[in-house]
Image: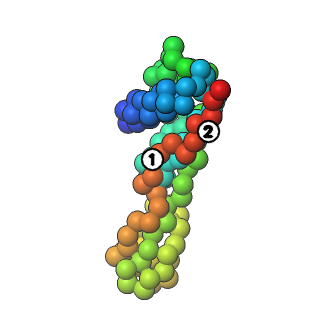
Amino acid sequence: MHEIGIAEDLSLIVLDAARKENLSKVTKVNISFGQLVQIVPDIFEFAFRETVRKTVAQDAEIDIEIIPVRMKCKNCGTDFQVKEYLFACSVCRSTDVEIINGKELFIKSIEGE
Ligand SMILES: [Zn+2]
């Protein structure tokens, strides 16, 4: 259940941004997670709601985008999207690969008034 810790961290960022922008209400929070972060969106949303209870963000809509895992093969240079957690090159089957996308964890944007 690492969603709770992540929800706490992200809620601090949201509330801090709301304060800087003088928002009286946060209406929407757009969040991006890489697939490797292994967030369960429902659990995250529940944890986030608990964390922002009685703040300007308590009624915010939460939009979660999951970024697929992309890797680059160090052997042949192919970059490919990982399917079903098969971490091997789709062309040469090498497992000498590096992660390009999939570990993201950030707030894309915040909407409010
Ligand atoms: Zn390869």
Identify the residue under disc 2.
Answer: 63
**What's the amino acid at mark 2?**
Asp
Identify the residue under disc 1.
Answer: 105
Label 1 or label 2, whichever comes before in sequence order: 2
Could you say whether the residue bearing mark 1 is in a helix, strand or loop?
strand
Tally of marks: 2
Which residue is at the front of the view, 73 or 29? Answer: 29
* Label 1, label 2: how far apart the Cα atoms are: 13 Å
- The x, y position of residue 82, in whole percent, is 50, 65
- The x, y position of residue 24, in whole percent, is 59, 20
Q: Is the residue 3 above or below the residue 73 in the image? A: above
The N terminus, quarter of image: top left
As drawn, which residue projects farthest toward the top?
54
Q: Is the residue 4 above or below the residue 55 in the image? A: below
**What's the amino acid at mark 1?**
Leu
- The x, y position of residue 73, in whole percent, is 41, 77
Which residue is at the front of the view, 20 or 11? Answer: 20
Tell me the residue at 42%/86% (across/down).
Answer: 76
Tell me the residue at 61%/38% (across/down).
Answer: 63
User: Are the residues tagged 1 and 2 within 8 Å (C-beta)?
Assistant: no
Label 2 crowd (10 A; few <14 / some 14-19 / many >=20)? some
- The x, y position of residue 31, in whole percent, is 54, 42
Tell me the residue at 55%/50% (across/down).
Answer: 66
Could you say whether the residue bearing mark 2 is in a helix, strand or loop?
strand
The C terminus, quarter of image: top right
Tell me the residue at 44%/66% (across/down).
Answer: 100
Label 1 crowd (10 A; few <14 / some 14-19 / many >=20)? some
Residue 106 in sight here = yes
Coloring scheme used: rainbow
Q: Which mark is residue 69?
A: none
Which residue is at the front of the view, 39 or 88? Answer: 39
